[in-house]
Image (cartoon, grey):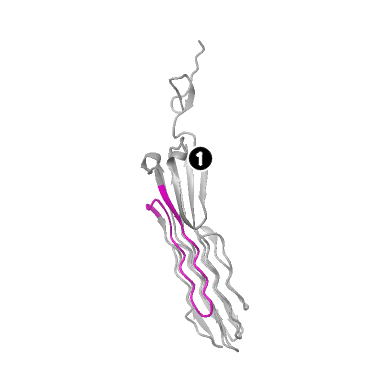
């Protein structure tokens, strides 16, 4: 009978004589993405060779505020904040048979002179959670003189930028905050709605209204949950 020498750190021989890889030595096998806002399920049994998982959770970004200036005046709005980020590694034995996964929805943009709403939180199994980013404010009134409006604080470097009015027709709205997995919406230097986000979990850019032209805020970036499967 032929014999085979194999490293016991990586291989084993089954009772049927089959050469098999040891659990936990195969490295990254698959990546599962949860991108649709709402509640989902991760089932451990769907992945029989699973040894451990790396879970990455991104909260949703805030929506920016709307701007509706008076004729002859202007209003720039600050950018909204990005959602927070969290990650952890779990051995397969630490996972429940079914883990609940929640993906937060991006905050909605304000209309008229109303603020944007906060982004939704994302979570994996209730043990890895990332909060949503704050919505953009709408505190400044229409005018013609120089003012500034503070941005919205956020996790890490994810704060929304402030806004500035220079005159009745000049100024700049704030850029949205960047997330770990996305880029914030751009600010406006001319009349227009807030800039849209890219990627996942970033904050929306602020709107800029001049001379009575109402501009809406913009929706923030949705969150996401990423599960890396290691065998």
- Residue range (magenta): 99-128
* Image side of residue 150 versus residue 97, left or right: right
Asked if one can make out residue 87 in the rendered structure from this viewpoint, the answer is no
Residue 83 position (above or below residue 171): above
Residue 230 position (above or below residue 4): below
Residue 2 position (above or below residue 24): above
Q: Counting other residues with Cα less than 10 Å from the Cα at mark 1, is it few (<14), some (14-19), or many (20 or more)? A: some
**Which residue appears farthest toward the top when viewing the image?**
1
State the residue at coordinates (39%, 42%).
Answer: 97
At which x and y percent is residue 31? 52, 45
> Total number of numbered labels?
1
Is disc 1 placed on a helix, strand or loop? strand
Q: Along the line of sight, which residue is nearer the eye, 118 or 2?
A: 118
Q: Along the line of sight, which residue is nearer the eye, 38 or 4?
A: 38
State the residue at coordinates (47%, 80%).
Answer: 139
At which x and y percent is residue 193? 59, 74
- Give the prevailing secondary structure in the magenta stretch: loop
At which x and y percent is residue 112? 53, 80
Residue 1 position (above or below residue 135): above
Asked if one can make out residue 84 in the rendered structure from this viewpoint, the answer is yes
Query: Is 107 within the magenta?
Result: yes
At which x and y percent is residue 115? 48, 75
Return the residue at label 1.
28
Query: Is 45 within the magenta?
Result: no
């Amino acid at each position: 009978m032929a014999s085979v020498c194999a490293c016991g750190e990586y291989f084993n021989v089954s009772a049927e004589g089959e050469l098999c890889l040891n659990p936990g030595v195969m490295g990254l096998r698959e990546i599962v993405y949860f991108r649709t806002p709402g509640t989902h399920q991760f089932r451990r049994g769907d992945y029989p060779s699973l040894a451990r998982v790396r879970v990455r959770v991104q909260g949703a970004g805030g929506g920016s505020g709307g701007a509706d200036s008076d004729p002859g005046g202007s209003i720039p709005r600050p950018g909204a904040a990005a959602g927070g980020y969290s990650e952890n590694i779990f051995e397969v034995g630490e996972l429940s048979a079914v883990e609940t996964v929640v993906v937060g929805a991006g905050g909605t943009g304000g209309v008229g002179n109303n603020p944007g709403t906060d982004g939704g939180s994302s979570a994996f199994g209730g043990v890895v959670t990332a909060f949503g980013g704050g919505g953009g404010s709408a505190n400044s009134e229409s005018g013609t003189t120089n003012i500034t409006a503070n941005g919205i604080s956020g996790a890490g470097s994810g704060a929304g930028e402030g806004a500035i009015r220079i005159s009745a027709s000049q100024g700049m709205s704030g850029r949205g905050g960047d997330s770990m997995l996305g880029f914030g919406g751009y600010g406006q230097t001319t009349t227009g709605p807030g800039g849209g986000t890219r990627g996942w979990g970033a904050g929306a850019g602020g709107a800029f209204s001049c001379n009575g032209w109402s501009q809406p805020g913009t929706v923030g970036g949705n969150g996401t949950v990423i599960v890396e499967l290691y065998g």
